[in-house]
Amino acid sequence: MSKTFASAGDMEEKTISFDELGDGLYAFTAEGDPNTGVIIGDDSVMIIDAQATPAMAQKVIERVRSVTDKPIKYVVLSHYHAVRVLGASAYDAGEIIASAKCRGMIAERGKEDWDSEYGRFPRLFQGADSIPGLTWPTMTFREHMTVYLGSRRVDLMHLGRAHTAGDLVAYVPDSGVMFSGDIVEYYSACYCGDAHFKDWPATLDRIAGYRPRALVPGRGDALVGEEKVQEAIRLTRDFLTRTYEPVAEVAHRGGTLKEAMTACRAACDERFKDYAIYEHCLPFNVARAYDEALEIDTPRVWTAERDREVWAALQD
C-alpha cells in the first residue's frame, strides 16, 4: 500500500501551547506544527510568522489578546513559505517585514509554493478562502534591521542561507531570546526542499554564538535554558549531516535518485523516524540534497505537480 502523500492524511487537531519565555515573550506551538513567536513591547506587539491562513492566525490572536491589548504593529516573516506567511492579513499590522531575499522568493515562487503546500498540508489551511492573496512585505533589509517597540529592541538578522536563501532570525537582547524560524527545529524533521545544506551549518554556528537563553524553533517545543537551545542546534545539525552525506555520496558516483533515497533511509530512518513530519519531508529533502551535490545552487521550484512526481518516484 502506498503512503499517504506528504501530510495529506494528518487531519488530527494538535494541542496548542502558549508559553512565556521571558517578560512579554511568548511561543505559540502545536505539537510539531509551524510555530509563531510573540514579542510585546512598551507600546505594541510584533508577531514572528503568521500561520497559513487568516483563520488559523485567529488562534494566535486569541492567545495574544489573553495577555495584552496593545496593538499588533509588526508581522515578521522568517522566510517565504506559505504556511508561515499567508495568514498575515489577519493581524492588521502596519508593517510586514522580511529579508530582501525573502521578498524576491515570494515574487519568484510564492504562488507555486502556495499551491504546493496547500496540497501537502490541508489541515494547516483551514479557512483557505480567507487568504486574500500572496503576502507582500512592506519593509525589507539585506543583513540587519533594528526595530524598537518603545524601549524594547528587536534585532532582525539574515545570518546566512539555511532552510531557504532568505531566512531571518529575531533576537531580543534584553532577554537573550531568539526566534529562529525553521533554521532550528526540535524533534521535528527539517524540511530541506529549498535548503542550502552546505551553508546551513555555518548559519547554525552564528545562532549558537549568541548563546540564546531561550529560543523558539520553527517546529517543536519552545526551548528554555541555554543547554536546551544548544541541544536543539546540535540535533538540527545532526539531521542535516545524516541526510546530506549519504545522498551526496550516491550523486557523486553517478547513482540514481532512488538509490540516494535508499541510502538516506539507511542513515536516517532509525534515528529520526519519530520526528514530526519526517516521512513527509524525506523525498523532498533527498531530491534537494541530490541536486546540491551536483552543484545546482538554486533550489528548483516546487510545484504541486512536481511534488507528486517526486513523491511517487521515491516510494518503496
Image (spheres, rainbow, N blue to C red):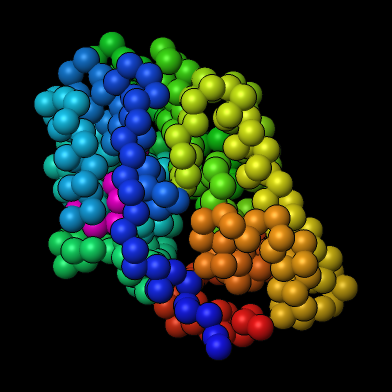
Q: Can residue 99 be spotted in the picture? A: yes
Residue 11 image point, x, y percent: 34, 67
Residue 56 lies in quadrant: bottom left
Question: Farthest right residue?
Answer: 253
| Left or right of 312 in this view: 47 | left
Query: Is 140 left, or right, of 179 in this rendering?
Result: left
Residue 280 belongs to magenta span: no
On whether residue 49 falls in the magenta region, the answer is yes
Q: Residue at x 72, y 80 (%)?
A: 258
Residue 270 on image: x %, y %: 71, 60
Residue 41 as seen in the image, left or right of residue 223: left
**Residue that appears at 47% across and 79% down:** 4
Q: Is residue 142 visible?
A: no
Q: Locate residue 272, reporting x and y percent.
A: 65, 56
| Viewport quadrant of the C terminus | bottom right
Residue 277: x percent and y percent?
51, 61
- The vertical placement of 59 against 195, above or below, is above
Magenta part of the chain: 48-54
Q: Quadrant of the N terminus?
A: bottom right
Q: Is residue 122 above or below residue 62?
A: below
Is 49 situated above or below 244?
above
Which of the pair 176/123 is nearer the observer?
123
What residue appears at the point 16 percent right and 31 percent down from the top-left corner? 66
